Image (spheres, helix red, strand yellow):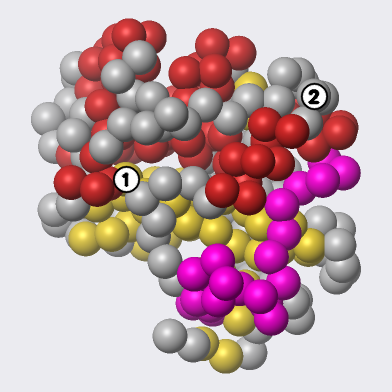
Amino acid sequence: MQDYLQPSAIIDWQHPDILQLAAELAAPWETPAEIAKACFEWVRDQVRHSVDYQMNPVTCRASDVLRYRTGYCFAKSHLLAALLRANEIPTGFCYQRLSLDDQGAPYSLHGFNAVYLPEFGWYRIDPRGNKPGINAQFAPPDEQLAYPVRLPGEAEFEPIFTEPLAIVVEALQAAKTWDEALLQLPDVSLERAEEYSLVPRLRVGRRTG
């Protein structure tokens, strides 16, 4: 579990602003589940999704997501991981592959989190941000993510990574504006998934792994 608590260049949870917010969010609560819910709901509701609000800059590092209060799904998961790790709650990174238009190609990875709660074990949460048609919640043991996997070519992946995927970080850092990032969102085909250790957890019509 120590690997899921470490700071890094992207998950810079030792930044003073992150430490301050993490302490404020945890203060009213006692259990890891209560603290995790408070952190999840804050990132989900207080950090604006880059596309929903057409906001710049394109953020990646957790402290920058907090500073600018905006980010893609990946960036929001980076901040949530930082807040949870600052509260000594093990947190990792999960990915889906989803259709961008709900009809098929093009596809993109979608990033969210898994948190380890003593009462429930690993529990997946999606701080992407709610809007009509999207209703992600924190209600363990039931998982309520932002997106279901419904179409051929889509998948949920099994691993819980200790750090964000390099292709995700590279894509976010390369883009200057939200609309530029939208045109170059990271994707991994199902045929190449194993090259990135992305073992399918769920695909349309069958479960694997």
* Three-letter code, disc 1: Thr
Residue at image coords 70%, 41%:
171
Residue 145, position in %: x, y? 52, 55
Residue at image coords 47%, 56%:
94
Q: Residues within 10 Å of mark 1 (few under 14, many from 20)?
A: many
The correct choice, above or below, for 38 with respect to 111 in the image is above
What residue sits right under mark 2 in the picture?
176
Which label lies toward us, 1 or 2? 2
Q: Residues within 10 Å of mark 2 (few under 14, many from 20)?
A: few
Residue 7, position in %: x, y? 31, 31
Tell me which corner region of the image, top left, top right, bottom left or bottom right, holds residue 87. Answer: top left
Q: Is residue 125 visible?
A: no
Tag count: 2
What residue sits right under mark 1 in the picture?
91
**Magenta stretch encompasses residue 187:** yes
* Three-letter code, disc 2: Lys
Q: Earlier in the sequence, mark 1 or mark 2?
A: 1
Question: Marks 1 and 2, Cα distance to the nearest angstrom?
Answer: 28 Å
Residue 23, position in %: x, y? 24, 16
**Residue stretch rendered in magenta on the structure:** 182-202
Which image quadrant: the C terminus?
bottom left
- The label shown at residue 201 is none
